[in-house]
Image (cartoon, grey):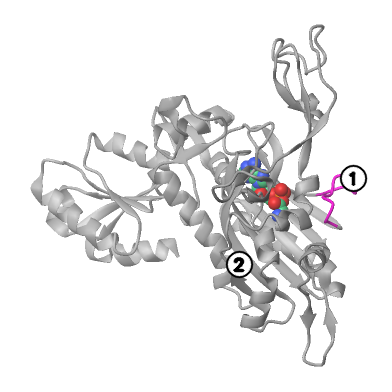
Amino acid sequence: MSEPVTMEKIVSLCRRRGFVFPSSEIYGGLGSTYDYGHYGVLMKNNIRSLWFDAMVQEREDILALDSAIILNPRVWEASGHVAGFSDPLIDCRTCKLRFRADKLDEAHCGRKPSKHPGEWKECDLTEARQFNLMFQTRVGAVEDASSVAYLRPETAQGIFVNFKNVLQIARRKPPFGIAQVGKSFRNEITPGNFLFRVLEFEQMEMEYFVPPDEADRWFEYWVQARFDWHVKYGLRQEKLRIREHSEEERSHYSSATSDIEYEYPIGWGELEGIANRGDFDLAQHTEASGTKLEFVGEGGERYTPHVIEPAVSIERIFVAMLADAYHEEEVAGRQRTVLRLHPAIAPVKAAILPLIAKDSAMVGHARSLYEELRREHVVEYDDGGAIGRRYRRQDEIGTPFAFTIDEQTLADETVTVRDRDSLAQERLPIGGVRAWLDDSLR
Ligand code: GAP
């Protein structure tokens, strides 16, 4: 039986293999910000591009957008973020820690961690007060109130304020969508749990504009479509569930929200949210800007479309996929750690390994196979150390296939292909490797 997967194990593997590092580590780091190393970047690129393919490339009804991170601050007034994007916060005068008032039962007392804040005799909690999660910055050289601006806390508003531009230029008719991927920033009070809740994250949001009487149907459609996407790229169904928000829990703009939750090593948590935002955003921006954000049909009919929004961060997907893929097992009396990532998500698709690094004929074959494959796929050449250690290294970064060039290759021009999950090995003609890999990754 495999040991349970803990967040510590995932953090340690990410560090050890160069997926993720604590940010600005040589200065002691900065809580809940991270830097991505080579494999982390490759894996994030895969998640982003598979999301983009499903949203834009494979559909006719969704267009791409890349709006600015710093918008006119009036955007955030109209959207309700300046007044309402806040969490209730409590300070403890004894341990000087800060807690979310609505999450005290998940927090630990700073002095007596076995107790929740407020439960220990020396706890001295303040009243709850509201704390806005937006990072403020200033635009221009003059530090007066008019120069205050915000780092966007969601990408969605950049889409709403471009609704008219897109509608006019692309000449679309609802239902149609606008998709955007980009960094969002939140000054989270209780960050932590590795990448699950971080201060800056890459959001992937799509606003789908529909005739009001079709909103319920499209809401159901997108909940299912996004659930299926996560399953398609490897998350186990039994680790996923859909949870409808109660009326009290829903955001001010939403008439229905469902979370796709994943059972992370820290428990069930929101992976992706799908919200029916109604006409809230377009109506707010119409009123605040004086620009009508509505659809006018050829026959003169006009209405404000309703919006269905699937919203997720690459970080939440990244952690879920690593947790799902992480396995420790014993093979032929030896321990191995393996990431059983979906091949489309895996940072490296195949390793090319000459059995004996000092054998120039083997190295020559391996290098030319590597040169051929790297034109199409992310592959890695490795001739350092014993073959067993090289396999284990590739297992830990989730490489689905390894091609080994050995003595037999020199005799008959075949190579061994090793499957990461089954460990099965078969021989292929070296000339057919490229087509075999193309097929296996399709
Ligand atoms: N536009 C709607 C919106 O932003 P949200 O539920 O606040 O809704 C959407 O965020 C998604 O963004 C979440 O489901 C989660 O995947 C991701 N997310 C939110 N805050 C995050 C954070 N601090 N760190 C990592 N991901 C976060």
**Percent coordinates x, y for residue 77 in the rendering:** 76, 54
- What residue is drawn where x is 43% and y is 40%? 19
Stretch of the chain drawn in magenta:
244-254
Identify which residue, 11 or 442, lies in the foreground: 11
Q: Nearer the viewer, mark 1 or mark 2?
A: 1
Identify which residue, 281 or 337, lies in the foreground: 281
Which numbered tag is attached to residue 9?
Answer: none
Query: Which residue in the structure is indicated by mark 2?
Result: 55
- What residue is drawn where x is 19% and y is 53%? 366
Residue 401 is at least partly visible in this image: yes
Q: Is residue 320 left or right of residue 332?
A: right
Identify the amino acid type marked 1: Glu
Identify the amino acid type marked 2: Met
State the predominant SS element of the stretch in magenta.
loop
**Percent coordinates x, y for residue 105 in the rendering:** 80, 25
Question: Sequence-wise, which precedes: disc 1 or disc 2?
Answer: 2
Residue 275: image quadrant is: bottom right
Provide the secondary structure element on which disc 1 rests. loop
Query: Which residue in the structure is indicated by mark 1?
Result: 248
Mark 1: few/some/many CA within 10 Å (<14, 14-19, 20+): few
Identify which residue, 78 or 156, lies in the foreground: 78
- What residue is drawn where x is 72% and y is 68%? 208
